[in-house]
Amino acid sequence: MSAADRAGEAPADPSQESPAEVYRECLEARRAEAAELGSLERLLSNFRLGVFLVGLAVLVGVVALDWFAPLSLVWPTLGFVALVAWHDRVIRARERADRAAAFYARGLARLDGSWPGGGNCATGFAGSQHPYAADLDLFGAGSLFELLCTARTAAGEARLASWLCAPAGPDEVRARQAAVAELRPRLDLREDLALLGEDVRASVHPAALSAWGAEPPVPGASGWRVVAALLALLAVAGLAAWILGAGPLPFLVALALEGMVAVRFRGMVAHALHAADQPGRDLALLSETLQRLEREHFESPRLVALRRAMETEGVPASVEIDRLRRLIELADARRNQFFAPLAAMLLWGVQFALAIEVWRARSGVHVAEWLEAVGEIEALGSLASHAWEHPDDPFPEVLARGPVYRGDGLAHPLLAEDGAVRNDVVFDDPLAVLVVSGSNMSGKSTLLRTVGTNAVLALAGSVVRARSLSLSTLAVGASIRVQDSLQDGESRFYAEIKRLRQVVDLARDEAHPLFLLDEILHGTNSHDRQIGAAAVVRGLVERGAIGLVTTHDLALARIADELAPRAKNVHFVDHLEDGRIAFDYTLREGVVEKSNALALMREVGLEV
């Protein structure tokens, strides 16, 4: 079995190749192909130069020295033209092989941990007021979005971002899971879409394209198109009759009528043809992606529906786009100076401008649907790629009742699998709150991010970094990475209490919130912190929320005692190894009994 064949299968046992091994084999194959094509490209370049010099010598022999007949120039000319065409095809093939190699290199980077900063870092999908995007590192360099996103269209990027920013319900999550599971083994499809999508990302303007498709067409375009065609036929018949001796009157009448129609639609023709120019080019690029998707056979209901959305009355979108391309090319023929007089007599511009308007009336409204369908398949493909690269990560079970979160062996998906310490986190009636204590750097904040990020992945339709995870639909609210703002004149404490208010409001508005509060209210004194933290956590629990609270202040551990059995204390510990502080990042029950703050200060050279 070749590497390309094995690439489509997720390893089921240790005897099969791992994703990294498949990527390496495919990368080596694409690099070898690119090197071979590069050698051929250089050889053809030399041949082109040689044939050009031969042709130049023959030209000198024909013109200056009269050594050869003029027909002698035919063979070097034909040879040069053939070499140019061949050379161009080889260049395109070599560039495609280079892009394929880059595709697999990026896949290996995701697996070996060298991916941060090398992918799509996307920073504009969530504002500063989003309840968890910044806290859980959804966007930016080294973010969850950068790890996941393989989309090449703006629609695909936006769809994936929207899934990460808002949880889906159980039925929607299951539909996405089925689609992701079907797409997971199709590495060849992901490679093809990645290669086709390079030009799409750079050149397609989705907002302008959708707006052009949705713009109201010219009223009565179909009827006027028939009128224009009949007048063109009348003009041709009148001209033929004049040539045969019947006189010019029929022809002149036809021209007069055509002139009236041309004046009537002069502005429309200029607008329609100009407006269709850029969308025509954009759709031509998108058509290659659509054609590739149209060749796929899908079985999951979501993918079948998306495949159907890429049709207009049963006609594939790529076929419709090809019709538009031909109409635009024919309309452009009127600019040829030799054809222009005949084009004027045939109302060429009017006819094809109206034909484009008829096309828009039939298919333009579906352009946005085509873009959305491609974007959703790309978003699903991003999740499928992540699932294929991590065959041990399971799909979570999404429950209708809640709030529930039962995670066995949770780890953070942005950490290397072989280095991550897994912990169990369970919230189920009556337990609703874990108060996490522990020393600095022991893993408290990472635990919050692990719980939240896996919830985001689960409710987006992805696999999760866990041995198993069952959860209900949860609205995540986090206060982990809160900072002061010099521009807004806000202290860190004020920024934190504003975020806490946002989390509390989320608990009022959503049925099942999941709150993640790191070092709650640590910007104020111990007395106020204890009273305020207890009130906030109690209010969240009373509203049906579940979540975690971390703290350095051991006095806050009393919150769990006050709320028992709905809350309990857990902690992380550290120990000394060879005079240095070490952590095992393993979650334990109970309250931590020591702090490492003084030891850390001494370790960096402070005298305390």
Image (cartoon, rainbow, N blue to C red):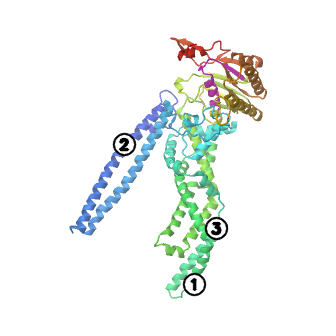
Q: Can you identify the residue that label 3 sits on?
A: 221
Give me the disc on residue 35.
2
For image coordinates 51% across by 43% down, the residue present is 189
3D distance between C-alphas at marks 1 and 2? 67 Å
Asked if residue 288 is among those painted magenta in the image, a careful observer would answer: no
Q: Earlier in the sequence, mark 2 or mark 3?
A: 2
Q: Earlier in the sequence, mark 1 or mark 3?
A: 3
Q: In this rendering, would 527 be left or right of 277?
A: right
Classify residue 450 by image quadrant.
top right
3D distance between C-alphas at marks 2 and 3? 53 Å
Q: Position of residue 298 (x, y in %)?
A: 58, 44
Please say whether residue 512 is visible from this viewpoint.
Answer: no
3D distance between C-alphas at marks 1 and 3? 26 Å
Q: Pick whichever, 135 or 19, lies toward us.
A: 135
| Residue range (magenta) | 433-455
Give me the disc on residue 250.
1
The secondary structure type at the circle numbered 1 is helix
The secondary structure type at the circle numbered 3 is helix
Q: Amino acid at mark 2?
A: Ala
Q: Residues within 10 Å of mark 2 (few under 14, many from 20)?
A: some
In this picture, is 387 found above or below 77? above
Q: Position of residue 508 (x, y in %)?
A: 77, 33
